[in-house]
Image (cartoon, grey):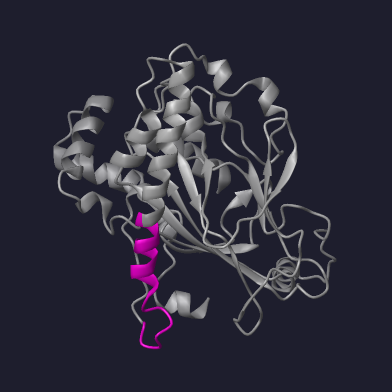
Amino acid sequence: SGPVEENNLVVPEASYTVGWSHGVEKVGDDFDIGKGSFYANPLYDDYVAIDGVREELVSVETDRSDTKLPKGLVFENLLKDNPAFFASNIWPTDVTDGRLEKLEPTFKQMGVFARNICIKVAEAIDGYVSTVSPNYKGKVGNVLSQSRYCKGRLLHYFSMNDIKKMKNAQTNTETEMKINEAVADWCGWHNDHGSLTALIPAMYLDPSGEVVDCPDPKSGLYVMSKSGVLKHVTLPPRSMAVQVGETTQIHTGGLVQATPHCVRGCHNQDSVHITRETFAVFFEPEFHGDMEIHAEGRSLDETQTQEAEKFLPPSVKTLRSRWKPGMSFGEFSEATFSAFH
């Protein structure tokens, strides 16, 4: 945390959605202290500085709100009211030791690569939806190929020993952690709220920083199927996984469902000092992107059925608690951030 603070990489006024974030996100009733994150948009350092974006934002916001305010004030209010969405990237400034000099270019390169893969996945999803809803116009692919907004997230999962120390420091007692049999102790159960998420295979590090094979075969990513079946997902080297988010679930009227997922820590005797490192990129619409059902004939109830809700893990907030037709993606994002922070 020392080097992070010295580089001014903690940005609470942006709801910790750029730079470093740790222990501020809630999953269920507890703050998620098992992982730390570094966020940035790998496509653009300053989204609102892109040619034409300011004018687009002001025009749509003026139409939606029917405001008579001057355009400059509309823009200022939009940025002030939505810092989590519009904050510019922040990168380490002290890279003299050589450890961080490749962070920014590698982060951006990997983000662009992930986007190209996810565009192909989005097109495949659209192809499937169009077989059920013939008038469907390829919404997911349009979002992935046209949106200039996305969020990359480097994740550091603290060792089980470090997590125990942090929990004991919070309670100021030597309590025994009740996580040995838990599945969701490195990252709690949740759905991603965007369109698609690219996931890079994890690296595991020993206390000296050397890469090691995962020493606990039960550790890693878990997903919950639509029928409530728990599945352990392992990614082979040089592969990429793509998870469906809630925005795609909405746009397809529930024909494609978001994937509840969590991460289980390393628990066997030889692995409690091991950390996990990975990279995810969240692809999503721009701020005023619509959150309507684009699959003709699909109803609100079909988008997330009450039967499907029965199989959501308890900490996964239902769509009906955060989304309603007529919302923009920015409004849906704010409702989601409020539910988890």
- The residue at the far top in this view is 297
Q: Is 177 above or below relative to 337?
A: below
**141 or 330: which is nearer to us?**
141
Residue located at (49% from left, 17% from top): 132
Q: Find out whether residue 108 is within the magenta segment.
A: yes
* Residue 146 higher or lower than 63, as above or below: below
Q: Give residue 235's position: percent from left, percent from top.
A: 61, 56
**On the rendered structure, is 243 left or right of 166?**
left
Q: Is residue 184 left or right of residue 56?
A: right
The foreground one among 96 and 211 is 211
Question: Is any atom of residue 294 visible in this view?
Answer: yes
Q: Return the x and y of residue 35 as percentages of the image width and height.
A: 60, 63
Task: Tell me residue 76's x, y (percent).
Answer: 23, 46
Which residue is found at the position 40% from the left and 33% from the top? Answer: 140
Is residue 61 on the magenta stretch? no
Q: Which residues are magenta?
A: 95-112
Residue 145 lies in quadrant = top left
- How many labels, in total? 0
Q: Give the percent coordinates (x, y) of residue 193.
A: 50, 40
Residue 331 makes an appearance in the image: no
Which residue is at a point 63% across and 85% down the rendered structure image? Answer: 208
Residue at image location 64% in from the left, 56% down from the top = 32
